[in-house]
């Protein structure tokens, strides 16, 4: 019974990704402005989460165990592995729909599934150990999972015009958080520690930044609506600041 509430909190954090799908129902007057706005917002969230949360917190965790030089080397290696892996899966993702928007949605889904599993472990374990720590962490994760849902749903929807398809991939990403955490806790609990989670999160940070710069930004620029790109980036900065200040 002790694991029920932590599992519920982990599930709420993961499934909040689905809220991002609501933006499919927004009927913009000009999709050529709305799409780059959403893409810029998505890439801003991915980059900012990586450089303000995943990488620095993981770096501190590693530095508590290793020397500064060793920590820097581990961080660089994990980041580069994440970059290389993203470039590799980018070449392997060749959907029947040749739309670059569709590819971005699929790639975002893959990256966010990998991101959500250790995030789910963190939510589950913190709630399992102390519910007063788990609740604010759940709220913070929910706030940044909503825009992550936008990262997946909007590109896939506008590429395919299929709401169910977009919902399916977003749901898979959301479910990876509680299910991945529970499976990892049951099967791999003896191997889950601050070190392994730090390595995974730096790796994911490398993936997020690479995907944002290499794929999402060039796609947003295709629409020649720079002011909407700046607006999307500005909104992502505001959201991350609010998340940092209050949670």
Image (cartoon, helix red, strand yellow):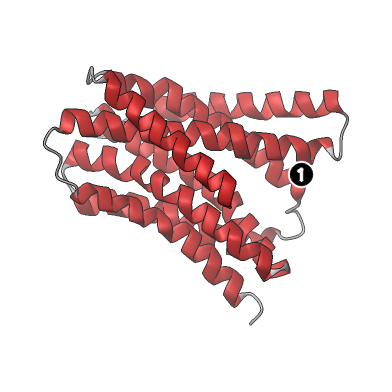
Residue ID at (64%, 41%): 200
Residue at the limit of the structure toward the bottom, as seen here: 1
- Residue 114 on image: x %, y %: 53, 44
Front-most of residues 238 and 47: 238
Which part of the image, by quadrant, shows the N terminus? bottom right
- Residue 196 on image: x %, y %: 72, 45
- Residue 88 on image: x %, y %: 48, 26
Q: Which residue is mark 1?
A: 195
Badge 1 crowding class, 10 Å Cα cut-off, few under 14, some 14 to 19, many 20 or more, is: some
In terms of image quadrants, where is residue 66? Answer: top right
Q: Is residue 91 left or right of residue 82?
A: left
Q: Is residue 223 left or right of residue 71?
A: left
Tally of marks = 1
Residue at the limit of the structure toward the left, as seen here: 29
Front-most of residues 3 and 26: 26
- Residue 124 on image: x %, y %: 62, 63
Residue ID at (70%, 39%): 58
Element type where label 1 sits in the image: helix
Residue 50 visible to an observer of this rendering:
yes
Front-most of residues 81 and 232: 232
Residue ID at (41%, 27%): 90
State whether residue 205 is above or below residue 178: above
């Amino acid at each position: 019974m002790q694991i029920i509430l932590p599992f519920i909190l982990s599930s709420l954090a993961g499934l909040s990704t689905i809220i991002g799908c609501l933006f499919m129902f927004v009927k913009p007057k000009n999709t050529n402005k709305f799409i780059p706005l959403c893409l810029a917002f998505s890439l801003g969230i991915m980059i900012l989460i990586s450089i303000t949360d995943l990488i620095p917190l993981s770096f501190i965790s590693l530095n508590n165990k290793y020397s500064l030089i060793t920590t820097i080397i581990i961080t660089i290696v994990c980041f580069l592995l994440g970059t290389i892996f993203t470039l590799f899966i980018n070449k392997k993702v060749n959907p029947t729909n040749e739309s670059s928007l569709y590819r971005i949605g699929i790639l975002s889904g893959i990256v966010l599934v990998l991101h959500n599993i250790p995030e789910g472990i963190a939510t589950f374990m913190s709630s399992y150990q102390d519910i007063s720590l788990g609740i604010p962490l759940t709220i913070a994760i929910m706030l940044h999972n909503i825009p992550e849902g936008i990262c997946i749903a909007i590109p896939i929807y506008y590429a395919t015009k299929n709401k169910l398809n977009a919902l399916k991939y977003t749901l898979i990403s959301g479910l990876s958080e509680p299910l991945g955490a529970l499976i990892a806790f049951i099967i791999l609990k003896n191997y889950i520690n601050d070190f392994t989670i730090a390595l995974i999160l730096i790796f994911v940070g490398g993936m997020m930044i690479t995907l944002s710069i290499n794929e999402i930004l060039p796609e947003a620029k295709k629409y020649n609506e720079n002011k909407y790109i700046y607006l999307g980036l500005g909104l992502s900065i505001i959201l991350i600041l609010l998340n940092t200040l209050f949670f």
